[in-house]
Every structure is written in structure tokens, then in C-alpha cells.
Amino acid sequence: MEKSIFKYILRFSSRQQIMLTLMAVLSFPVLYIFYELPKQIINGAIQGDPGTFPQKAELFGINFGFSVGHIQWLIILCVLFLVLVIINQAFKYVINVYKGLTGERMLRRLRYDLYSRVLRFPKGTFKNMSQGEIIPMITAEVEPLGGFIGDAFAQPIFQGGQLLVILGFLFAQNPFMAAAAVALYPIQLYLIPKLQMRVNLLGKERVRRVRTLSDRIGETVQGVEEVHVHDTSRRERAEFSYQLGGIFQVRYKIYRQKFFIKFVNNFIQQLGPFFFYSIGGYLVIKGSLEVGTLMAAIAAHKDLASPWKELLGYYQKQADSKIKYDQVISQFEPVDMIDESAQTEEPKDNNTLSGELSLTNVILNDDQDTPIVDGANIKFSLNESVALVGAPGSGREDLAMLLARVIQPSSGSINLAGNDIANAPESLTGRRMSYVGSGGYVFSSSLADNLYYGLRHKQISENPDQEKAREFQSTITTSEASGNSTDDPNAIWTDYTAAGASDDDSLVEQALRVLEIADLTDDVYQLGLRGTINPESKKQTADLVLEARNKFLEKISNEKDLASLVESFDIKAYNTNATVGENLIFGNPTSDEFDMNHLGNHEYVIKVLDKAGLKAKMLHTGYQVAATMVELFADLPPDHEFFQQFSFISSEELPDFQAILGRVSKDHLDQLKEDEAAKLVGLPFLLVPARHRLGIVTEDFQRDILAARKIFADELPDRLKKDIEFYNSSKYIKGATIQDNILFGKIAYGEAEASDRVGKVLAEVIAEIGLRKAIVSVGLDFNVGISGSRLTLAQRQKLILARSIIKKPDVLIVSDGLSAIETNVVEDIMKKLVNEMSDRCLIWVLPSISQASFFNKIIAMKKGKIIKSGSYEELNSGDGIAKLIEDKNT
Amino acid sequence: MSLNDEVELLRQVPIFANIEPAKLKLLAFTSERLTFRKGLDLCVQGDPGDAAFIIIEGEADIIIKMDNGESKTVNKIGKHQIVGEIAILCDVPRTATVRASSDVIVLRISKDLFFRLVGEFPQMAVQILRELAARLENTTTQLAKALGK
């Protein structure tokens, strides 16, 4: 990148800078006239001799060819003044906006360039440079540069020009006075840079310290588990505080220096009037200077102050920006950066590779120049499955990384089907090869996005949403102006052909196949069951789900054993496995409007109870529930977990209810206060008769609730209609999961192993209808959370593996990326993958040699050297492989 | 069957016989009432024990898997009997499989709950001691008989 900020500015925005300069220069004549005109107004119009009017209209030596009266002339000049004010401010407005545009464009370019560079960093750079340093550099540190870039040339020219204009004006009036006004400037010009130098050094120091600080915060966040495990928060605080202290000192020094500069500046500025008053005053008294001239000099000096101050400010800002730029850029130029062309070059064709993968004298040294991989010479054909075996520390993982070009060898070469992979573009290594290692990462997006990540190398076609595509097209010019990417991230990137698919449907097919290999199908299926869909956009799936609902109902009603497992929603029947509240509303709340825990406070619900003649009964029931709860829980300590698990009343509220029960007897509920009554009415809504068995929800009560259910639905006001989806056996419930949509009822409490048995029936129904694929594809929409935190580690590792399989690489290297998966599952996956890759190359770093027999070829390593290679039988002859690779030092 | 019926039932189980009704009510309320259909296992030999069961209705077989792989029904239990308490008392795996020989309704008392109750109501612990001692006595007599044969 350009070594100095000015070079960078000139290279990418010289045209804008010239425009800005031109505009600044153009504004000067206007400015000059603007200063000159008031003199004309005072001398020519206000103080003009009335006798000379009407006179010829003449201004700045230009004769306008008509004559004017006294007042007329004043008005004309004043209007002219007003016009000049407008023109002057318009200039400022246009210049400022253009400056902003230029600055923001350049800032965008700078950030993009820096980010592009991060993508080209060799892996080793990240050993010495942390997230905590990189992030603030690209985000916060370069931010003020944008402001400066707009000002870089225009500001000194504009302010300097203004200064010269005023100065010119002054010289025209009285050269002596003008010279006096600027007499002290040279002192400032000499002093300020010297002082500024010290501030600059401190500024550098500050930037460095803040970076370490953010690095520290990043470490704390990542290592927070260790902090808790070892009780070191106090030490962490101490270290953080120490670093804050350092920053404080530096910042304080900067303040002192800055304000000292300000002090010096202002002092020198004020020296002017001192000299004017003293020397000028002396001269006036002595009669060698007129008092008017002195006054004019003082006024001129004051006028000069503003642009002069701006110029000095610019000087400071410029120095500051220079440091910031230098400090950021120097961090973004690591040695061995990946060539830009390696990431932009497209391959000539996408044909599968055939031939050999060969290593010639490959050596990898660590930081201390000790060989980790020592002179590897081996070749194998691209249709072989290869097992890398060796003791831990034998260099097996490093060899795998070298093969995958995750790291570069210190010397030697690796050749993939005639391409030296050291110089091959990423379009070759990233599309024809794949690698699953310990650095695998799951991005915070959907499962599908993660699975298809390896298929998204370039934009394949435009966004199918034409309006969005047009919208994006319209932003391309601005992207280009900043040298940014012109690809549309919302367009179609997924390379269907690479996965052996032709459209969304066949891609899901491939995804299913790959998930099966990676042993992830069941997990995704479960996620799918618990997922929701929009029945309008996925009508086909929704219809199938409804079909499954009918089939499920049929199944459980026909088989005696299953009948009691699920109690279906029936508009005419009370559901004893649902709460009273759910029975009343008989629908899925789509917002917080109908909160099951606070139904007793809902105006409409109370109205319905009233109408159904249920209010007194609910109150009575509420009283009964409260009495039972108080009886059961009154003796327990308030923090007892039974409260959370079983009680309808929290331990904090219990005394309130106790008081109510103590004060008002069962037969005098009319004595309850309004808020007390509301509290009691709310309680029965939470009862589930099948679960709570309090004997309170009697059949009579159920009948009443059913009557109220009808009233509730019939009279629901329009404004509340959007807050509920009523259950309807032939309608998909939008807000409910697929599973709930199929069950369309409640799993029975009190039926042993109900969920497991329901799950089995559900799976049968789904298989019969052929819904499984659709459900898995709903599971693919599951959002995995930040770095996949909503998945287990094993699921994440399987996902990363699946991502590598689906792109059908010619060479797939599996290293230590499956550590969290159970051994027998890994073995299963391994068998399936050997089969999948039968005509391609699979290289596997085996943690245990027991699986070596699955592979065509075994490469045995010891202390960084390949000690033997060949078929399983060849290596296993004699003392066996275990003996062969045994490393007594480890 | 409501909570009060369950309390009546619990009172007929020896180890709960002397506990005050209010506590039994809490026990009943915080326990799950489950139906095991005929043929389902209440618990399986060798699994970790996480709950005891009180039979409210129906019968179940106690089945032990022998070393030679054969299964043998060694006992039958019915109404008002408690089963599965050994595994939760001494943290050993289930010593036998309990299989419903008819539809069985039980009250399932989880291990946590059971221990909390024992901790909170020492009289319950005493009752359990008594019950266990009686069983030991019973077993010893049976053993003596068996040896005498």
C-alpha cells in the first residue's frame, strides 16, 4: 500500500482533490467582493453626499449605464450584499458536501483494502496479531482519516487563500498595517511544529497502547472460562487497570501538550493587540499615526485570526492523520502475503483432476528452525485412499496441513496433478481440494449456509428477486468509485453443478446424502421437527404436514395402545392435558397480547368470562387453588426449588395470598378488593387437570370453559384478531413447530414414555408420507448461533466435514477436526467416506491405527520423517504398525 | 383420582404411614402419576436408578436376568407397594427389571424429591429404616430356610 497518506489520497482521489481546489479558488473573488462591498455601502451610499444623487450606477470601476437615486443606491448595494452572502454560503455548502463525499469514499476504500489484506494474510501472521488488534484498526482507527482526506488539499488552499485574500485586502488599504498584523506569524510557524512533534510521538504511543488494551479485552472474553475456573478475576482487573493507567498518563500528557500549544498560539495572537496598543498608541500620541488607521489595523488583525487558526488546526490534524495512517498500514504488510492474483484468478476449466499428488523434499521448520516435517518424498495416485499414521508429534497433522496448503513448506515442493500448489490459485486448491482440521469454523448463519459455504466461490447469477437485483445494480457505481467489490452478496452464489445438483431441490437431495455420510441427518431432522415454516411460501410442505396430521390422528385413534398418548385439539372437547387458559383461547398466540401467565388481567378475557357467567366460578376456583398452594408450600423456605418447579404462586407472592385467604373467607368473596380478585381469577388459567390432579377442574367447569371458548372466538374484536391463530384441524398453525402441527394436540401427561412412543409414531407417519426430506430441509434453515454455539461440538465438527464433502473435492484431507465425535461414529463415517471417495483421493490422519485397514495406502511417520509407506499388509507385516511408529520419546 | 385420593393411598404404604397428611399431599403433588401399559418396563436392570415407584393400580413382575442370560420372574408386586427404592437409596444400578404385567398406574417419586423429603422429615427416614430392617429380617429367614433345605 502507499507509504504515506498523501500518496494514497493522490492516487485514488486526485480528480476530486482538483475539483475541490478549483471550487475553493473560484470562491475567492466572491469573497473579495464580499469584503469590499461594505466599504462601498458605507462610503458610497450611507455617507455619500446627497447632492451628488441621482448619479451613475458605478461599482468597482464598472459602469452599469443607468442612474440611481440615493436610497435606491443603498437598496441596490444591500441586495447585492445579500446575494453575495448567499453565494458565499452556497460555495461553502457545496465544498463541504463534496469534501464529505470524497472523504467517505476514500474511507470506504481504505477499509476495503485493509480487509482484503486480512484475507491475504498468511496463516502465521495471526500468531502475532490478534482479533483485538485488527478489529479496532479497520473500524475505529481509520475513521477520523475519512474526515481528514476531504480536507487534505482543499482546507489549506481554502483557508490559506482566504488568508491571502484578506491580507491582500489589507495591503490594498494600508501596507504598513497589514505587515503589522502578520508580524508575529513567523514565530508561530517556527514554534508550533516543534511542539507538535512531541504530541505526535505521544499520539503514536496512545494508539499502540489502546491496541494492546483491546487485545486484552479480547483475551478476557475468549478466556473467560479460565478466569472463572481459577478465580483470577482480581488479577485480570489489576492488569486491565494497569493498562488503563498507562493510557491515562499518555492521554493526560497529550492534553497538556495540546493545550500548551493552544496557550502559545493564543498568547502570540494576543500579542498583536498589545503591540498595536503600545507602539501604535505611542505613535498616535506622538502624532505620526492617525487613530483611524490604528483602529483599522486592529480590526484587520482580528479578521485574519479565524483563517489563521484554521490553518494551524489543519496542520495538527494533518500530523495526527499521518501517524494514524502509518501505524495502521505498517501492520497490514506482513511478509509472505498471498498474491492478489491467487484469489482473483479463475481456473480455465472445472474438470476433475487426475494424476498424482507428489511431494519432493518437503521440509517444514518451526520458529526455531527445527524440522517438524523432515524431507518428505512420496507420491500417490489421485484415486487412492491414504492413511497418515504416526505417534502424536510425529508431524502427521503438519504434513496434512502442508498438503492442504494451509501452511507453506520451508522448502521443497508439492505437486498436484501437474500444478505446483505453492503458486496455484485458490480457485484450484479451494475447489478441487478440501481440508478438515482443528481450525474449522461454523459461521453464525443457517445450517444450510454453513453446509453450502464451500460451494460459494463466485457469483453465479443475479438475485432472483428482480427488484432487489435492480436495487443492487444502482449501488454498483458507488462501489466502483471506492474500488470495492461489485458482486451482489444476495445473488445466487451456490454452485449447484459443483455439488452435482441442478436446482434447489436436487441440492437438498445432495445435502441429505452428505448429511447421512457425516451422521448428521437425525440431528437435522430433529431440528426440522422443532422448526417453523411459513405455510404461504412453503405451501407444499405445509400441505404435507396437514396430511401427516390426519394420518397421525388416524393412527392413534385406530390403535388402542396409542390412543392415550396424544390428546388432540377438538373444538368441541375440553383438552385435559392443556391449561385452562389454552382451552379457553383454543389457539396459538402470535404476540404477547395473550400472555398465559397474565390472562386474569386481560380486559377481553375478563369480559368473556363475565358473559359466560364464569367470573364468579373462576374467582371461587382461584380461591381454591390459592388455598391449596398455601397449604402445600407455606412451610417451605422461600428459596426452595419446588416453588419454581411446581407452584403457581411464587414465594414472593405467597404471603399476599396468605393474607387474602386469612382476611376473606370462602363464602364472602365479594369482600375482595379489585386487584385481589384479579389475582385470584388469574390462577386457574394455569391448571392442567391431567397433570395437577387437584380435583378442581370438574366436568361442569370444563363445560363452562367450552361455552366460554365459543364466546371468546365469536366476539373477538378485530384489533385482537392478529394476536391469535385459532386451532382448525384443516389449517396449518403458522406460529407452531412442525411437530406440534402434526400432533395437533398435547402429549398426554401420565403416560409412561409418551414422548418416545409419540416420536416413533411420528417418524412412521413422516416416512409414509415422504415428509422427511422436507423436514430435514426445514432443519437446514436452523440458525446455528454465534460460531455455531447452538449446536454441540460434535454436531459442529460433523457440519464442517459435511461442508467439505458436498463440494466433491478431488482431494479430501481429514485431520484432527473430528475429535469430539465418538470413536465408533468416526469409524462409521470413515467407512462411508472411503466408499464415497472411491474414485478420488482421501487422506486421513488417523488418531488410532485400528482403522488403517480401511485404506489403500498407509504412510507411517516418525519424528517428522516418512519411515515407510505401502499397503496395510505390507506395513503390518513383521512387528506390526504400532511397533513401527512407536516413538519412545513421546 | 384426585390429589386427596392419592394421599389416602400413600397412607397405606408402610413407609409413609406415619407422615402427616399435609406432607403427603406435597409428595403427591410434586410426583408424577404415570400409566405403564402392559409389557412396558418401569425400570430396567443395570440402568442407573433415578426414581422409586408406588403402585396405585395393577401388577408388575420383578424380573432378574441371570448370569447365564436367562430371565426369571422372582416376584410380583401390586397395589400400595413401593418398588425401585433400593437403587435410589444406595446409588447402585437397578437390581432388577420391573415389567408391567397389566396396565399399571404408579406414582413416580424422583430421586431428588425422595431425598429431599427424607432430609426434611426425619420420621420418614425412621420408617424407611424400619421397613428395610424388616425386609432384611425377612431375607435372612428365607436364606436360613434355603440353607437348611
Image (cartoon, coloured by chain):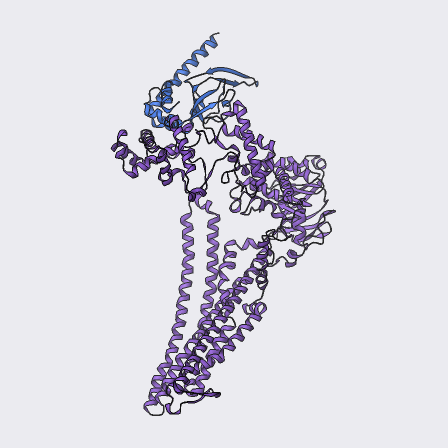
Residue A296 image position (x, y, % from top left): 38, 84
Q: Which chain is blue?
A: B
Residue A639 visible in rendering: no
Instruction: Quadrant for residue B67, please give it.
Output: top right
Quadrant of the drawing holding the N terminus of chain A: bottom right
Q: Which chain is purple?
A: A
Q: How many marks overall?
A: 0
Instruction: Quadrant for residue A662, please give it.
Output: top left
Which of the pair A90/A74 is nearer the observer? A74
Residue A499 image position (x, y, % from top left): 66, 45
Residue A496 image position (x, y, % from top left): 65, 47
Quadrant of the drawing holding the C terminus of chain A: top right
Residue A696 image position (x, y, % from top left): 36, 27
Residue A784 visible in rendering: yes
Q: Residue at x 74, y 47 (%)?
A: A355
Q: Is residue A757 left or right of residue A275?
A: right
Up/down of A463 relative to A854, above or below: below
Up/down of A582 relative to A3, above or below: above
Most extreme residue toward the right is: A355
Which of the pair A204/B17 is nearer the observer? B17
Q: Is residue A166 left or right of residue A279?
A: right
Up/down of A759 relative to A200, above or below: above
Most extreme residue toward the top is: B149
Q: Residue at x 53, y 55 (%)?
A: A129
Which of the pair A547/A379 is nearer the observer? A547
